[in-house]
Amino acid sequence: MFDAIVIGSGMSGGWAAKELTERGLKTLIIERGRHIEHRKDYLDQLDPWELPNFGMVDEKEAAKDYAIQSACYAFNTGSKQYWVKDSEHPYTYPADKPFMWIRGYHLGGRSIMWGRQSYRMSEMDFEANAKDGHGSDWPIRYKDMAPWYDHVENFAGISGARDGLPQLPDGEFFLPPMALSAGELAFKAKLEDSFPERRLVIGRCAHLTEARPHHKALGRMPCQYRSICERGCTFGAYFSSLSATLPAAKRTGNLTIVTDAIAHSIIYDPKTKRATGVRVIDANTKAGATYEAKMVFLCASAIPTAQILLNSASEATPNGLANRSGAVGRYLMDHISAINLGGVLPGLEDVYHEGRRPNGFYIPRYRNLGEEKGDFVRGFGFQGSVMRQNWSTQAGILPGVGADFKAKMRKPGPWMVGMAGFGEMLPRPENRMTLSKAKDQWGMPIVHIDCGLGPNEHKIIDQVMVDGKAMLKAAGCTNIYVGKHYGGVGLGIHEMGTAHMGKDPSKSVLNKYNQAHDVPNLFITDGAAMASGGCQNPSLSYMAMSARGAHYAAQFLKEGVI
Amino acid sequence: MNPEPHQGMDRRGLLQSLAALLGAAATTGLPSLSWAADAAPSFFSPAEYALLTETVDIMIPRTDTLGAVDAGVPAAMDGMMLSWASAERREEFRKVLAELDAAARAEGAGGFMALPRERRVAVLTAYDRKIFLNAPYGQFKKIVLTTYYLSEGGATQELRYKAVPGKWDGAVPVTPDTRAWAF
């Protein structure tokens, strides 16, 4: 009998386990994937010419086993070991609503391959549902989250500048910001001159620009500017479960980890209205087992979290566990992403850059804040960089052969702006995932995802393209390109909302402590908990919610309330 | 130990000493990746391989620095036809070589390799000029450039590469000798 079981070891599960073990709770992590050893299993020591096929995954293998995963920007032969084989982990979606579900099943989950951009949600984001009526009103506000953002930023190590923007609150423990490139400073000056409400700032990212004592105590070292982060980092310079939260949990002596254990369902006692444990299936032998605990943290990531709840249906809970509201699996969100824009920024031929910065610029949301309105609710931001081109930028389209071409490629190319819009998706009940009758090889019902873009999302996509082009023009860019959106959902890799927080137990799944309305000793602190998504990368919010949820859960256990 | 890498310090040595310092075992095996330049081609026919070798040599010739052949591009591309390319991709690359040969025959030659060097250059230059309209060739050229500029020689002699830069600077003065970063 454990004090707590945490299902999942990624961004959220790692944090829940750290906070629970540090409060003295004997905690078991159940991870569906294989064990990964920090440093030892990473391929970050390979030079480009040592990587199989210079980093390019075999097209035959990609088509057969990674039909969805290969659409991810970080999919290469240095990171291939982390992505699931779609061929072994099927799910379905309607033909006209492609849902690109990017996944990693191993210890540490997607905290190994994540994009590391780390932004707070703001007061405006927590008020959004209440103000425009979409989704459920968040039962918390920014003030409830602020101390927990401080807490996780300090431990994780978030590099960033204090920009003083209300829509993007600053942190108290930021590590020194990375510098903007010369091209970015020029781009910033021109666009802020043309659009006073738009600001270009350096990205905030989970990299140690400076290792403080509590980072060093975990063996973490400063970022070496290699920018091959998706392979894993031997230096432990970016935050992941493997570099930070799991080692911190282990040193308490209170942590047990079981890998290759697929959570099948949560066991519920209708008499006490409590969860009593978790049924698992051994990923290799397919044998069943049961673990018992006084409380359960469900941190499997948004879609599997809802899958497990729905698969935990019992006589007492026929619609699935903690699903009195019927909201489990509904209100699925991602961020509108992959709308790429760019252009050549003339000038600045006398400066170049050195090192590979694993971070970019950010243009935080500006629509529907001040004077710049939109014919939609919510908003979007832009992320990108301005760097000089090299041989790879136009490798497949640039004409030229011979010594002259070679000499040209030898010199730094023109500065080029590359950026992408990230927009908010509204929480809508019809965007949902359900369980199919068909089961996978482990006996889990296959997930069916029916999630599409609505009118508000389409208006945001249009505005991203218009605004992006206008900013590139205002900066004097030439050769401007504006890409098209892929028309689906999922490539933001920010699945959220499938067991959301709300004030009303008849409409939402979790209360203000990330505690299930229906099951007092069940907590959900991954993306499933999000009542809305803002337009910022959400991982920092999952970290803060996990730490906050664990704090209250431990307190409730101590008080004998759960 | 200062994690800032020293100039010329072996990168793997650095990582291993850092890892050792941290009590971790640096035991990850390196894949054996030798594109044996003198071995017989495993995918292309001898005639195709000769044409491929000549094509990449014209594209990136040896100058005061190494050329594509010096960097092992033909062998790397031949190997990748098996280890990377899909069936469609293989046919596309074969088609590119066949088209170059056909373009030479259209000039009355017995084939690309039957032309004198300067006319081969002219045929490839004309073919290359239409890269926008020729996606298979675009992909072919991309692989030529990738296997050259990401080869050890291409990355470190022709261009520049640091395994562990150790710092980021967004505004470094350019000198006449400044070379582009390979990666």
Image (spheres, rainbow, N blue to C red):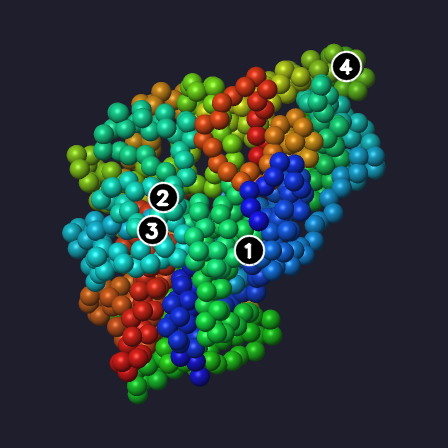
> Left of A500 or right of it: where is A107?
right
* Residue A481: percent from left, percent from top: 41, 27
Indicate the secondary structure of the residue bearing disc 4.
Answer: helix
Q: Is residue A319 visible?
A: no
User: Camera-side residue: B6 or A374?
Assistant: B6
Residue type beneath disc 4: Arg
Asked whether disc 3 touches disc 1, contact meaning CB atoms under 8 Å apart, the reply is no
Residue pointed to by mark 3:
A173
Please tell me whether mark 3 or mark 1 is closer to you in this view. 3
The quarter of the image holding the C terminus of chain A is bottom left
Measured Cα–Cα span from mark 2 to mark 3: 9 Å
Mark 3, chain letter?
A
Mark 1, chain letter?
A
Q: Residue furthest bottom?
A: A271
Q: In the image, what residue occupies the spot 30% across and 42% down?
A: A162
Residue pointed to by mark 4:
B117
Measured Cα–Cα span from mark 4 to mark 3: 64 Å
> Left of A477 or right of it: where is A86?
right
Residue pointed to by mark 2:
A160
